[in-house]
Image (cartoon, rainbow, N blue to C red):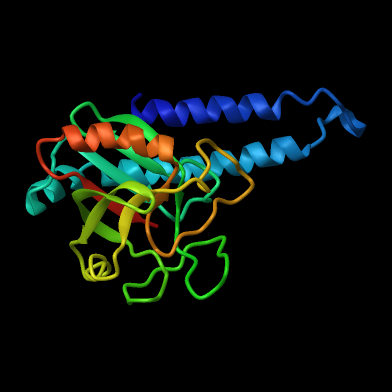
């Protein structure tokens, strides 16, 4: 599915949601229901996600080449998007297509639960770190099959030291739960186990290490 088409599809969904309320108020204006408001908020978040991805299109091939990473597959996690929406996106750069997407948790930092992401590169901060990662060795840990992550920028250079990994966890929903929020992690990009299995097939089949780019 091409990225431009995704935006068009989101627009259609939003317009449909805003026209499904048949009740009328004074002046024959449709009532703004809770469902309409939620649909509008969700559309704005999704639009923000795909605009950000579009803005990276020209940078991605050069960045992959610079770090010796796979020049076809790229995984992007936009942690500035509401956590109840699919904000981790797997891209095929050759066809400019979205191959898959799913929810991803961010770190809770200094609080028990954080609705929005706070970034840090410091050990024991329990925060997410933005920047470019190389998805490294696969291993079987306490959460199942996972991948070590190597931070390639100043903003995430301590990721390996902090044991920040890409791993599955049951608390992460498989599908959209907006406006509810996803659970938090201790800084790891944490995904649903079934989504992880889908990612595994792509990552394991790649000839070069795949990039994970965490953005805001």
Q: Residue at x 32, y 62 (%)?
A: 130
Where does residue 30 sit, x and y in percent of width and height?
Answer: 81, 30
Q: Which of 161/210 is in front?
A: 161
Q: Residue at x 67, y 28 (%)?
A: 17
In the image, residue 125 above or below residue 131: below
Where the C terminus falls, by quadrant? Answer: bottom left
Where does residue 73 sit, x and y in percent of width and height?
Answer: 21, 37
| Position of residue 155 in the picture relative to residue 77 (left or right) | left
| Position of residue 166 in the picture relative to residue 207 (left or right) | right
The count of marks equals 0
In the image, residue 159 above or below residue 172: below
| Position of residue 171 in the picture relative to residue 57 (left or right) | right
Where the N terminus falls, by quadrant? Answer: top left
Q: Which of 43/176 is in front?
A: 176
| Position of residue 18 in the picture relative to residue 185 (left or right) | right
Where does residue 125 sit, x and y in percent of width and height?
Answer: 40, 75
Where does residue 153 sit, x and y in percent of width and height?
Answer: 20, 65
In the image, residue 23 above or below residue 84: above
Q: Residue at x 71, y 25 (%)?
A: 19
Looking at the image, can residue 10 be seen? yes
């Amino acid at each position: 599915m091409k990225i431009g088409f995704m935006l068009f599809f989101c627009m259609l969904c939003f317009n449909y949601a805003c026209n499904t309320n048949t009740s009328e108020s004074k002046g024959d204006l449709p009532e703004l229901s809770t469902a309409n408001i939620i649909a509008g908020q969700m559309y704005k978040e999704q639009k923000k996600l795909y605009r950000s991805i579009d803005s990276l299109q020209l940078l991605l091939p050069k960045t992959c080449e610079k770090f010796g990473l796979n020049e076809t597959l790229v995984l992007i996690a936009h942690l500035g998007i509401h956590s109840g929406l699919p904000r981790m996106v797997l891209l095929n750069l050759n066809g400019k297509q979205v191959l898959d997407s799913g929810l991803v948790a961010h770190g809770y930092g200094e609080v028990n639960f954080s609705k929005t992401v706070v970034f840090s590169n410091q050990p024991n901060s329990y925060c997410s770190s933005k920047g470019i990662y190389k998805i490294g060795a696969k291993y079987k840990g306490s959460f199942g099959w996972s991948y070590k992550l190597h931070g390639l920028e100043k903003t995430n250079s301590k990721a390996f030291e902090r044991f920040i990994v890409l791993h599955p966890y049951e608390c992460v929903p498989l599908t959209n739960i907006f406006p509810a929020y996803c659970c938090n992690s201790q800084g790891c990009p944490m995904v649903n186990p079934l989504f992880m299995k889908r990612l595994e097939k792509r990552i394991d089949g790649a000839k070069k290490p795949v990039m994970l780019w965490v953005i805001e």
